[in-house]
Every structure is written in C-alpha cells, then in structure tokens.
Amino acid sequence: MAKEKHSHPASVRARVEFRPGDRLTDRDPADISLAPGDHLATAFAEKVLLAELAVWQERLYAEGLGGGRRALLLLLQGMDTSGKDSTIRRVVGGVNPAGVRITSFKKPTVEELAHDFLWRVERQLPAPGGFDVFNRSHYEDVLVVRVHNLVPAAEWTRRYGLINEFEQRVVDSGCHIVKVMLHISKAEQRRRLGERLNDPVKQWKYSPADLAERALWDEYQLAYQAALTTCSTDAAPWYVVPADHKWSRDWIIANLLVDAMRDMQPQYPPPNYDVAEQKRLLAASD
Ligand code: AMP
Ligand code: MG
C-alpha cells in the first residue's frame, strides 16, 4: 500500500515513543509540530490514513476468520478530559464495527476485586483478527491505585513486573499492542472541565470527583512517569501523544495505528474452496 504523502510515520512514531530514561516533563502537551500541516491539512491527511486503516482492519479480520492468530490492541490512558472517548469516536469510528471491540475499565466490581488485577483484563483481550480498544486498562492498577494507596506499596510495586510479563505473553500470542498516553496540560484540563460545566449538553460528563483527582495532578504525573519508564518495553513500547490539540492528537494516533498495521501486513486468507469450480457452478446455475 502506498505511503501517505504528507506523513513521516517512522519519525512520528520515534518522536512520540517513550524510552526508559525519558522524562514526561520534557514532553510538551501542546506540541503540534508532529502534524503534517495546519488544522485543515492535517484533517485531510487523517482522512487518508483512516481510509487506509479501514482496509488493513478488514484484512486483519479476514485473516482471523481464515485461522490467523494475530490481533491489534490500542490501549488508551490519560487524565480526565484527555480525550480517550473522543479519540475512540474519531479514530476507531471509521472502521468496520464487526471487527472492533471497545472495553472501558471502570472502578473494579466486587467480583473483579476478588481476583488478581490482571484477571479482568485477560478476559477482554482481542480474539484472533480483532481490533480492540482498551479505554483505561491494567495501568489503572499502578496509577489511581498508587495515587490513592488502594493497596499497600509492596503490592503495587510488584505490579510493574507482572504487567511486563503479561504484555510479553500477549505479544508472543500474536497480539500487537499500541499503548498511548494522551498527554494534556493541567491548564487544558481546567479549560475542558470548564467547558463541561458551562454547556448543558456536556454537564453529564462532569463529576465533582474530577476536581479531587485534579488536586492530585502532580502525584498522577509521577505515577505516569513510573509506569511509562518501567513498562515501555521492546515488546510493547509506550507512546506519549501530545493531546492539548485534538486535531493533531487524532492524526498522530491514526498514524500509530496505520504504522502498526503496515508492520503486521495482515493478509486475506486464501479461499478454502476451489474458485474455478465455483465459477463453473455459478455459470451453470440459473
Ligand atoms: P471514567 O473513565 O470517567 O468512566 O471513570 C472510570 C473511573 O474508574 C476512573 O476514575 C478510574 O480511575 C477508575 N478506575 C479504573 N480502573 C480502576 C482500578 N483498577 N482501581 C480503581 N479505580 C479504577
Ligand atoms: Mg471521568
């Protein structure tokens, strides 16, 4: 498939990748320099990428039906209002819904809490051929859980290693993982929370609890830093996507997904019937 003219996928991916040793404070949430042009040019480039993504996704789905084991998982993390839902709507909304599954991880239920923290995640992993999205994930178990001391420090500390082992196993089983942190600034969060409060059709998205979490902003950034550093692995690297500007954010994520698919090169399965014979039979039918 031809590469999209305006984009430089390899360099974009390399520029948003988070490597052990990198610092989150060095990443500018308002950076728009990765986008291929201004708002309009980028929106157009995004359309082209999403059309390509839709074709790849159909191929992946067909490959799975044909017995292939591979799948693609987009994992989204980010502070409140960072745009997890709207990213899913905008970037994932364009592909064939038959092959897509979206899972939102909320506060664990009593049943979920009775199990290991990875239990509920394992059960939602994509089926072969699937293109799945995690809206929040097992990383909550080293983010909100760490910030609020929901389990003893000794417990959340050992989770980083368990997460790395888990993700390695998932990747080895054929599932490609794209882990994205939607990185917004504290000022942009204030603006977005204000938007929710000021607009009657957005007030349902606001919760007074959001302000309590906002007050813990610095603690969350430290917890993110630890998760990004410890769990950005060769098998499943983290990408920190500047997310103050939605148009640039969406293009970067479309780019990461198309890049992943180009690496995977999913293939339509060969027909499991004799095409020539079926053509003859069709011609002979009335
Ligand atoms: P929302 O994404 O706005 O629907 O909120 C989901 C809430 O569930 C967030 O406040 C998360 O921090 C919380 N949550 C998700 N996973 C966990 C977890 N493992 N432990 C505690 N809280 C969680
Ligand atoms: Mg919320």
Image (spheres, helix red, strand yellow):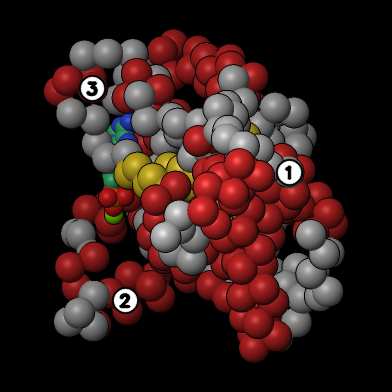
* Image quarter (top left, top right, bottom left or bottom right) of the C terminus: bottom left
Q: Which residue is mark 3?
A: 112
Marks 1 and 3, Cα distance to the nearest angstrom? 36 Å
Q: Is residue 257 left or right of residue 81?
A: right
| Residue 138 visible here | no
Label 2: which residue? 194
Name which residue type carries label 3.
Glu
Secondary structure of the residue carrying numbered label 1: loop
Residue in the picture at 22% in, 53% down: 209
Residue identifier under label 1? 265
Q: Position of residue 278 (x, y in %)?
A: 56, 45
Residue closer to the observer: 98 or 172: 98
Does residue 55 sit above or below 117 in this rendering?
below
Return the disc, 2 or 3, that comes first in the chain's sequence. 3
Instruction: Residue 140: name its quadrant.
Output: top left
Nearest the camera: 240 or 252?
Answer: 252
Mark 3 near ligand 1 (CB under 8 Å)? yes
Q: Amino acid at mark 1?
A: Gln
What SS does tag 3 mark?
Answer: helix
Mark closer to the chain start, 1 or 2: 2
Q: Residue 37 at x, y = what percent? A: 75, 82
Q: Earlier in the sequence, mark 1 or mark 3?
A: 3
Q: Label 3 near label 1: C-beta < 8 Å?
A: no
Report crowding for label 3: few under 14, some 14 to 19, many 20 or more residues within 10 A (C-alpha).
some
Label 2 or label 3, whichever lies nearer to me, is 3
* Distance of label 1 from label 2 (alpha carbons): 43 Å
The percent coordinates of residue 154 (x first, y second) are: 44, 11
The Cα–Cα distance between marks 2 and 3, rounded to whole angstroms, is 34 Å
Residue beneath the point at 66% across and 44% down: 276
Check the picture and name the quadrant holding the N terminus: bottom right
Q: Residues within 10 Å of mark 2 (few under 14, many from 20)?
A: some
Can residue 102 be seen from the camera position used here? yes
